[in-house]
Image (cartoon, rainbow, N blue to C red):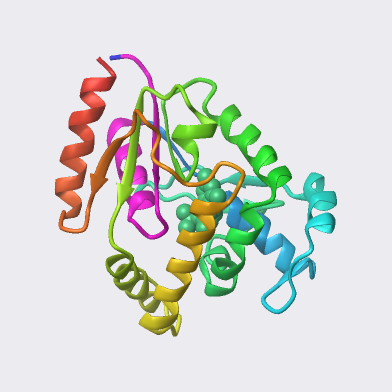
Amino acid sequence: MKKIIIAIDGYSSSGKSTMARDLARRIGYVYVDSGAMYRAVTLYAIRHGIADTDSGVDTETLVRSLPEIGISFTPAGADGTQHTLLNGEDVEKEIRDMKVSSLVSPVAVIPEVRHRLTAIQQEYGRDKGIVMDGRDIGTTVFPDAEMKVFVNASAEERARRRVKELTEKGEKVTYEEVLENIKERDHIDTTRKESPLRKADDAVLLDNDNMTIPQQMDWLLRLYEDRSR
Ligand code: DC
């Protein structure tokens, strides 16, 4: 079997990160959560007063600060989970909160931010044997990936999953605010000029509204076996 690049793109909270991480662990590949990288840049911007919910994002200052933003990951633990590091600090929990979620899409529209993160992501894929999930992995980061999956689920189903996930972590959120955030991010992600979220022509569509996690894994493993032959 040859080593390949697996690109998993899709809407926010479509379950693509869990599926990409589990797949990487099953087949012994490296997993990279590209959304976590955009979230870490956003957290940096919030902490340095460059982004806030009232005034939005100060693009010029953020672009100037990019060389000072170091993003890396801890090695995967036994369950496949990795933690995101911002200049060496573990920020895994903080990058998932609602404040970061509400500012990450405006940060992710900035071309300089995208170029910098795309270059780091391409470097991760140099030796193949990688599963990366995001919005533009099959279209921009790895247009030649041997396996591309585009994941979709309804906004309502995604909001239900996200509320469950945040509530389990102890965050107090309502279904309505989460649904609104998801719809807003869908809109920004699909309509931005630079690398908008869209299905690559050669990506396989996975509609997972009515699929269990084991069913999705079987589906992915079959596709992987086919593409790596
Ligand atoms: O997958 P996620 O929800 O953690 O991603 C957070 C945000 O980052 C998402 O709203 C859009 C942006 N993103 C992106 O623009 N390109 C990627 N490859 C990954 C994420």
Which contiguous range is marked in magenta?
2-28
Horizontal and vertical percent for residue 209?
21, 58
Q: Residue at x 27, y 40 (%)?
A: 205
- Quadrant location of residue 201? top left
Q: Residue at x 57, y 70 (%)?
A: 102
Q: Is residue 129 left or right of residue 51?
A: left
- Quadrant location of residue 149? top left
For the C terminus, give its image quadrant: top left
- The number of discs equals 0
Q: Is residue 168 left or right of residue 141?
A: left
Q: Is residue 171 left or right of residue 227?
A: right
- Residue nearer the viewer, 75 or 218: 218
Horizontal and vertical percent for residue 172?
44, 85
Q: Residue at x 14, y 47 (%)?
A: 215
- Can I make out residue 71 in this image? yes
- Residue nearer the viewer, 75 or 193: 193
Q: Is residue 225 left or right of residue 13?
A: left
Above or below: residue 7 compared with residue 3: below
Q: Residue at x 66, y 60 (%)?
A: 42
Above or below: residue 38 compared with residue 5: below
Above or below: residue 204 compared with residue 3: below
Horizontal and vertical percent for residue 6?
38, 31
- Residue nearer the viewer, 222 or 207: 207
Horizontal and vertical percent for residue 81?
42, 50
- Can I make out residue 83 in this image? no
Indicate yes or no whether the magenta region holds residue 53: no
Indicate yes or no whether the magenta region holds residue 21: yes
- Quadrant location of residue 121? top right
For the N terminus, give its image quadrant: top left
